């Protein structure tokens, strides 16, 4: 039964933010806590389904998104816009603040859980890895190595952001200064040293909520012939031999980047499954890949065009490694199965996560040039090191070691219970 506590969730308009927030919402609802999850009208039906027995406790609330010049019609998440045009979505998000404030005033929730860094940085900051003495905020982030969307400010009562709304650099600073506590999608067994440092720096409670590992997918029947063919190919591959390549739905690759990844996969001589959406610059699926690529690869690899069931793929016994952008959710999903990690960060936040993973001896990072570019040789070298070369054995063993932590549901339930106890004990 509900205990009377009401928590508001306010994630940034990106699925890499909204889905972890929904996972947290479900975990809290299981403890009888009432949740109001605020996002826009178009995003609500695109979220994963809430378990039927929790629908009475999780209210998906429409947050109106005002029209803004430069924001495409119907665009309500970063997946709907071109790379580099986040500023228009940010502006619309800021303009929805009055509706947010009205909801909070009327509902008087006990807690607000809000992204610390909902929209990224407005300015084009240089990569922290390219600076000898990074700006102070980069030092702070790289020290704790947390993706901002996996670290949430927890507020009691009405949160008062800067006058422009609740996003942007000012919003980040105010969030850090004004939150009553910090909730982090992590655990001491994985990042204890970083959590301790963060608590020391902020001088307020820093509460790991566990890694929220997803429930392993159930084997299901499929009526999609393309997916059935892909599964059949996977079933025919040796255990732990295939590299899964996936950069998510929000990654906007340029043509030369797609070609370099493709040619790197070709040079690696490894079996692979690449989940790739047709880029906006491609006229069709064939135009997406280098000329002659599929004929040269033959049956060694599969390029699956369109959305793919990532969890189902990662759980398949033939998968042995994953090439991805090092986003925190994908790190958790990959390590949950003990796969080798090959990371190619494409944004500043991902670079911080990649640095942490490399420092822990958990991932191999594709070499990136000073101008942010990468090439096929770097892709092929990293893949072979991670998957087959003797020198990469320590990385493979480290991932298997971390698997025991990430897949320990009892451990993460303990962290969630500690977080819930904090919320309840601090309630006035």
Image (cartoon, rainbow, N blue to C red):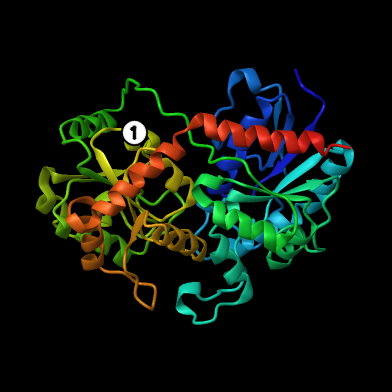
379 in relation to 73, above or below: below
Residue at the spot of label 1: 315
Residue 360 seen anywhere in this rendered image of the structure: yes
Residue 85 horizontal/vertical position (percent): 55, 64
Name the image quarter holding residue 402: top left
- Seen at 58% across and 45% down, the residue is 185
Q: Quadrant of residue 287?
A: bottom left
The image shows residue 278 at horizontal and vertical percentages of 34, 51
Q: Residue 161: give x, y in percent of width and height.
A: 80, 58
Q: Is 335 drawn above or below residue 198 in the view shown?
A: above
Regarding mark 1 in the picture, which secondary structure is present there?
loop
Front in this rendered view, residue 248 or 337: 337
Q: Is residue 96 above or below residue 170?
A: above
The correct choice, above or below, for 68 with respect to 106 in the image is below
Give me the residue at 78% from left, 53% from top.
Answer: 97
Q: Is residue 64 visible?
A: no
Seen from this angle, which residue lies furthest bottom? 132
| Residue at 42% in and 55% down | 326
**Image check: 3 left or right of 320?**
right
């Amino acid at each position: 039964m509900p205990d009377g506590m009401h928590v508001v969730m306010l994630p940034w308009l990106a699925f890499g933010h909204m889905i972890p927030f929904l996972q947290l919402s479900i975990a809290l609802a299981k403890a009888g806590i009432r949740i109001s999850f605020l996002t826009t009208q178009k995003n609500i039906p695109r979220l994963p389904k809430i378990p039927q027995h929790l629908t009475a406790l999780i209210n998906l609330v429409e947050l109106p998104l005002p029209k803004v010049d430069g924001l495409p019609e119907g665009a309500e998440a970063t997946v709907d816009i071109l790379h580099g045009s986040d500023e228009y979505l940010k502006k619309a998000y800021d303009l929805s603040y009055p509706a947010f404030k009205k909801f909070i005033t009327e509902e008087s929730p006990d807690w607000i859980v809000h992204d610390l860094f909902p929209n990224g940085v407005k300015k084009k900051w240089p990569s922290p890895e390219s600076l000898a003495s990074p700006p102070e905020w980069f030092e702070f982030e790289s020290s704790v190595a947390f993706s901002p969307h996996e670290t949430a400010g927890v507020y009691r009562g009405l949160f008062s952001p800067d006058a422009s709304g609740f996003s942007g650099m000012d919003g980040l600073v105010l969030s850090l200064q004004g939150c009553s506590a910090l909730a982090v999608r992590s655990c001491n067994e994985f990042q204890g040293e970083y959590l301790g440092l963060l608590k020391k720096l902020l001088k307020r409670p820093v509460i790991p909520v566990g890694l929220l590992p997803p429930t392993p997918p159930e084997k299901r029947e499929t009526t999609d012939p393309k997916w059935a063919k892909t599964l059949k190919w996977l079933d025919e591959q040796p255990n732990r031999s295939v590299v899964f390549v996936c950069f998510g739905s929000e990654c906007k690759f340029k043509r030369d980047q797609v070609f370099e990844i493709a040619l790197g996969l070709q040079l690696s001589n490894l079996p692979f499954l690449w989940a790739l959406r047709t880029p906006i610059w491609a006229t069709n699926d064939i135009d997406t890949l280098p000329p002659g690529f599929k004929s040269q690869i033959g049956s060694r690899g599969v390029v699956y065009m369109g959305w793919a069931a990532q969890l189902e793929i990662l759980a398949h016994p033939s998968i042995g490694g994953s090439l991805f952008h090092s986003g925190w959710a994908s790190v958790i999903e990959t390590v949950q199965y003990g796969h080798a990690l090959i990371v190619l960060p494409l944004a500043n936040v991902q670079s911080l996560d990649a640095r942490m993973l490399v420092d822990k001896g958990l991932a191999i990072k594709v070499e990136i040039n000073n101008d942010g570019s990468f090439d096929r040789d770097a892709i092929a070298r990293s893949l072979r090191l991670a998957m087959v070369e003797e020198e990469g054995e320590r990385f493979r063993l480290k991932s298997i070691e971390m698997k025991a932590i990430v897949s320990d549901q009892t451990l993460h339930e303990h962290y969630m219970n500690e977080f819930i106890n904090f919320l309840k004990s601090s309630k006035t």
